Image: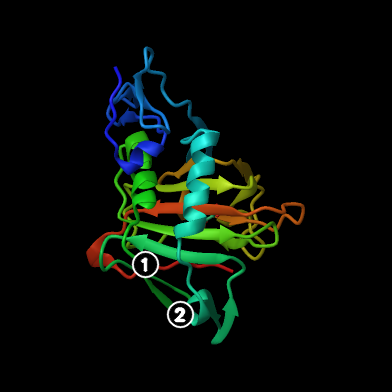
Amino acid sequence: MKRNTGVRMDKFVTRHRKRSVEADEWKSEEPIKKFKDGSEVEEEFSQPIPWQKFEAEGLDCDYSFLFDKEEADHLLTQLEEEVVYFTGDKAKVQVYGKLYSVPRKQATYGDEGLMYSFSGVHLLAKPWTPTLEHIRDAVTKATGHTFNFVLINRYKDGHDHMGEHRDDERELDPACPIASVSLGAVRDFIFRHKDARSGSTKRQIEPVKLELAHGSLLLMNYPTNTYWYHSLPVRKKVKTPRINLTFRRIVKNRQKTSIKTE
Ligand SMILES: O=C(O)CCC(=O)C(=O)O
Ligand SMILES: [Fe+2]
């Protein structure tokens, strides 16, 4: 079957898969593959997205590829054109009363009125763009979860980084994983158990190290962010940019949301 809808989003190629939450198995939602020229073909076999599970004491993550290289390249280009990052004091954090620039660029998009607050800055969500809606909807199709907010981090190269933190704010709906989409340079991502950090009781718990690849999706499921800190360390050999999008569900009457970082 060939159809030509002429809709702008036909440029995207997405794997339309949906997780049956009850059965914990994958099934095809829409056996149609779309090509960039707007044409579509029915896929004869509906293959589930292969997920890799990462588990440790109190850590539960799922990792997969959401976008193939062609679409991931396209999305990265679109986001590089479209995303408006914070500047000035909104691009800084306050630590013990002093302002520091964050070692990356940040932007927040989401449903109207949602606010993101951390270390003395309050960042209002800008309205979803079509590209962000497309990525959000692809994550929803792949996971069965809905999201009302995204934090975007842009790392211009391997010098840009994110310090160890947990995303454990009470306004985040714990039933909804934090869904992290990565585009661009492959970067290491490290989880460390809170009891294995210096200054804590210092138990011997091995860190969990992942590589977040171009087009990938990492789900941080409950209770990962209760017990494990995560960071994106400096990697001086990395010369190219990376954009990361963490889709979240904020419980509106529990705002403000916050992040402990740097
Ligand atoms: O860039 C990343 O992969 C990490 C992002 C992150 O931890 C966050 O946005 O809270
Ligand atoms: Fe995080």
Please report the residue visible at 35 percent of the width from the left and 56 percent of the height from the top: 129
Q: Quadrant of residue 196?
A: bottom right
**Amino acid type of the residue tagged 1 in the rendering:** Thr
In the rendered image, residue 4, in percent from the top left (x then y), is placed at 29, 29
CA distance separating discs 2 and 1: 12 Å
Q: Count up the numbered dots.
A: 2
> Relative to 66, is 26 above or below?
above
The residue carrying pointer 2 sits among few (fewer than 14), some (14 to 19) or many (20 or more) residues within 10 Å by Cα, namely: some
- The residue beneath circle 2 is 120
Q: Assign a secondary structure to mark 2.
A: loop
Please report the residue visible at 64 percent of the width from the left and 52 percent of the height from the top: 203
Q: Quadrant of residue 56?
A: top right
Q: Residue furthest left?
A: 253
Q: Residue furthest bottom?
A: 97
Q: Assign a secondary structure to mark 1.
A: loop
Disc ID at residue 257: 1
Please report the residue visible at 41 percent of the width from the left and 19 percent of the height from the top: 47
In the rendered image, residue 125, in percent from the top left (x then y), is placed at 34, 66
Say whether residue 166 is visible.
no
In the rendered image, residue 69, in percent from the top left (x then y), is placed at 55, 35
Q: Quadrant of residue 15?
A: top left
| Quarter occupied by the C terminus | bottom right
Q: Is residue 220 left or right of residue 185?
A: left
Considering only order in the chain, which callout, 1 or 2, is on the residue closer to the N terminus? 2
